[in-house]
Image (cartoon, rainbow, N blue to C red):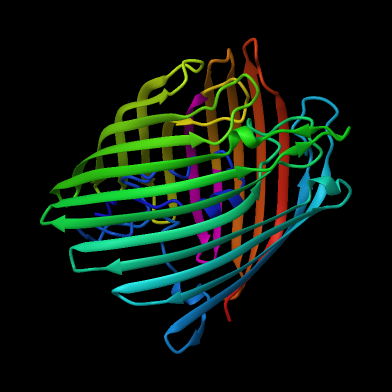
């Protein structure tokens, strides 16, 4: 059973994907993920559509002695019908996105080294103020000290732009808000018969650039600059090849470098405690769920502390060998760029279907709901997102891609946020390897 305790989240990839509000410093977010690669006990279970490998369609890297270089170039074009995420006076535009990527790997069963560089260049036909040039750099070392012990280290640095649909994106600025993320994360795991222990340490620094209004007025964003330190401990015990129990504890400290006027800095510390299980039922259903308690204490009494139920889980149902249904839920505390608010409790639920129509054609559809309950503000946001995608491989090197996304957001309360509908679609091609 692939029951992984920890899945390191790459902040760079998240930033380039537009999830600028994600809390990449939370080292426990991947506990028990279905996408495990470090099994406690192995079996011959079915694999999901996304897990299944097709070596005959996989690109080959360029090899230099003991090194492997994998180049990739993705280009897509499409249309966004509501660039500024507004309810009225919607503005749409066509766009072109180019994403070059280079990955240099030193493969080894004991010490695997990876260097990865990615860029994301998006250009609009008319609204050139929305053009963005993002990048991400990452270095990883995966060291297998012994058969039972493993040490992983990752360093990342990325520059990204907040999407206009982000609740933290300042309104009225002429360009999408830019920021940089620098992160270092280390984990060590050790297995003792049926017991596996894991510890992690993560430090992340975010630096936001000031915005500017059409009138040339500066929109200060320095109050959002912060450093987040997260320490994690976890233990998992396999009751059988099909069921394991785990417990996890996480402590974080969030230090802000500046305050905004009379509003104090949002320095805080918090923790998460959870118990969970991973399971594999009849080779048709696999999952990981956990529940517990979360709390975030703010240093200044100006902000109200946040606490509540922690729920996080993912369950996959293998309807057939070609169709996988996946449901997930995640409830956590998120920081916010809204002045005067401590943060918000975010609950994300989703249902996704992946269908392998052909060995080289994968179709996916997903519905997601994100609810935000703000602290210190009378505001609740409710966002629904529909996504669809198709990936068709013409050869080992060439793949055609299509994507569709529709978002609908409502907001209630005396400090209600923006409400909008937004649709975006794209068609593209990806060239990989040699």
Residue 311 visible to the viewer:
yes
Q: Is residue 215 magenta?
A: no
Name the quadrant of the N terminus. bottom left
- Is-magenta flag for residue 361? yes
Quadrant in the rendering for residue 317? top left
- Residue at 51% of width from left, 24% of height from top? 344
Position in image of residue 290 (x %, y %): 30, 35
Q: Position of residue 124 (x, y in %)?
A: 82, 51
In the image, is 35 to the left or to the right of 84? Answer: left
Residue at left 47%, top 20%?
300
* Viewer-nearest residue: 7 or 158: 158
- The x and y percentages for residue 273 are 28, 32
At 37% across and 61% down in the image, what residue appears? Answer: 153
Question: How many badges with numbers are in the image?
Answer: 0
Displayed quadrant of residue 244 = top left
* 149 is higher (above) or lower (below) than 65: above
Q: What stretch of residues is rendered in magenta?
A: 343-365
In front here: 134 or 195? 134
Quadrant occupied by the C terminus: bottom right
Magenta: main secondary structure: strand
Residue toward you, 92 or 285? 92
Residue 380 position, x and y percent, is: 57, 18
Tell me: residue 425, above or below residue 410. Answer: below
Picture layout, residue 125 above or below residue 386: below
Outermost residue on the bottom side: it is 65
Q: Looking at this rendering, what residue extends furthest in the top direction?
A: 414
């Amino acid at each position: 059973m692939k029951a992984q305790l920890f899945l390191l989240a790459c902040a760079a990839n998240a930033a380039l994907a537009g999830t600028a509000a994600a809390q990449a410093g939370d080292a426990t977010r991947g506990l028990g993920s279905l996408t495990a690669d470090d099994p406690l006990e192995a079996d011959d279970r079915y694999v999901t559509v996304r897990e299944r490998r097709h070596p005959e369609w996989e690109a080959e890297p360029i090899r230099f002695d003991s090194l492997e270089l994998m180049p990739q170039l993705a280009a897509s074009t499409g249309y966004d019908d509501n660039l500024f995420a507004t309810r009225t006076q919607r503005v749409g535009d066509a766009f072109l996105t180019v994403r070059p990527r280079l990955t240099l790997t030193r493969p080894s069963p004991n010490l695997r080294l990876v260097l990865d560089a990615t860029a994301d260049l998006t250009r609009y036909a008319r609204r050139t103020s929305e053009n963005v040039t993002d990048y991400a750099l990452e270095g990883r070392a995966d060291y297998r000290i012994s058969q039972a012990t493993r040490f992983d280290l990752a360093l990342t640095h990325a520059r990204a732009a907040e999407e206009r649909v982000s609740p933290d994106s300042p309104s009225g600025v002429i360009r999408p808000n830019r920021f940089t993320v620098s992160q270092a994360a280390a984990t060590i795991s050790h297995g003792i018969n049926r017991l596996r222990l894991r510890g992690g340490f993560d430090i992340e620094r975010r630096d936001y650039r000031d915005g500017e209004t059409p009138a040339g007025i500066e929109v200060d964003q320095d109050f959002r600059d912060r450093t987040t330190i997260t320490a994690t401990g976890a233990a998992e015990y396999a009751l059988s090849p099909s069921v394991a129990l785990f417990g996890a504890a996480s402590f974080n400290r969030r230090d802000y470098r500046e305050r905004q006027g009379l509003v104090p800095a949002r320095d805080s510390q918090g923790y998460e405690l959870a118990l969970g299980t991973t399971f594999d039922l009849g080779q048709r259903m696999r999952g990981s769920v956990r529940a517990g308690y979360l709390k975030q204490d703010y240093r200044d009494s100006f902000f109200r502390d946040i606490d509540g139920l922690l729920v996080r889980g993912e369950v996959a149902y293998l309807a057939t060998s070609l169709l996988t249904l996946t449901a997930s839920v995640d409830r956590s505390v998120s920081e916010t760029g809204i002045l005067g608010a401590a943060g918000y409790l975010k609950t994300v639920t989703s249902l996704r279907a992946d269908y392998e129509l052909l060995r080289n054609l994968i179709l996916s559809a997903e519905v997601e709901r994100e609810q935000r309950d703000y602290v210190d503000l009378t505001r609740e946001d409710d966002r629904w997102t529909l996504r669809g995608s198709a990936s068709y491989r013409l050869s080992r090197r060439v793949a055609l891609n299509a994507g569709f996304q529709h978002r609908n957001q409502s907001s209630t309360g005396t400090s209600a946020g923006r409400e909008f509908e937004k649709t975006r679609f794209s068609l593209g091609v990806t060239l990989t390897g040699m």
